[in-house]
Amino acid sequence: AIADPAGFPEFMHGHPYADSAEHPERVIVYPGDIILGDRDGVVVLRPEMAARVIAEVDAHNLQARADAKANIPYFEREGSEEKLKAFKDVDWR
């Protein structure tokens, strides 16, 4: 976090390795917005989107638990190999 002229902390998104003082990106937060944060960043969620986001997260977590029980590795669940093979510069021998 950096401090704005009034002294309040500002959190950035987008370019984690850029100099945040030179590349400020601001998010407008309205009353009632849901704010979630951890060491990787902060998310601002409009209340009218909350039910859909929660449902999608629950569905993802349910599938992830089922895959873990079935010993399906993450890279297979997500189709990582196929995605990587789609890159022209990846050499698969």
Image: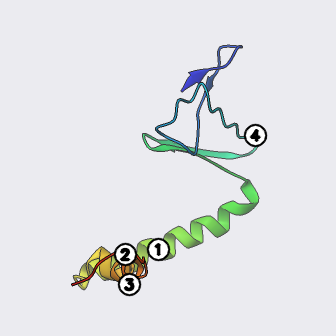
Dot 4: element: loop
Foreground label between 1 and 3: 3
Q: Residues within 10 Å of mark 4 (few under 14, many from 20)?
A: few
| Residue 40 found in image quarter | top left
Dot 1: element: helix
Q: At 65% across and 32% down in the image, what residue appears?
A: 24
Q: Is residue 41 above or below residue 3?
A: below
Find the distance from the CA under tag 1 to the CA under tag 4: 28 Å
Q: x, y percentage for residue 65?
A: 34, 76
Q: x, y percentage for residue 33?
A: 72, 46
Q: x, y percentage for residue 63?
A: 41, 80
Find the distance from the CA under tag 2 to the CA under tag 3: 19 Å
Judge from the rendering whether residue 39 lies leftward or rightward of residue 12; answer left or right.
Answer: left
Name the kind of residue labelled 2 in the image.
Ala
Residue at image mark 3: 82
| Residue 35 found in image quarter | top right
Residue at image mark 4: 28
Q: Is residue 46 above or below residue 51?
A: above
Residue at image mark 2: 64
Residue at image mark 1: 60
Of label 2 and label 4, which has the lower sequence position?
4
Q: Quadrant of the C terminus?
A: bottom left
| Residues under numbered marks 1 and 2 in contact, where contact means CB atoms less than 8 Å apart | yes
Find the distance from the CA under tag 1 to the CA under tag 3: 20 Å
| Residues under numbered marks 2 and 4 in contact, where contact means CB atoms less than 8 Å apart | no
Of label 1 and label 4, which has the lower sequence position?
4
| Residues under numbered marks 3 and 4 in contact, where contact means CB atoms less than 8 Å apart | no
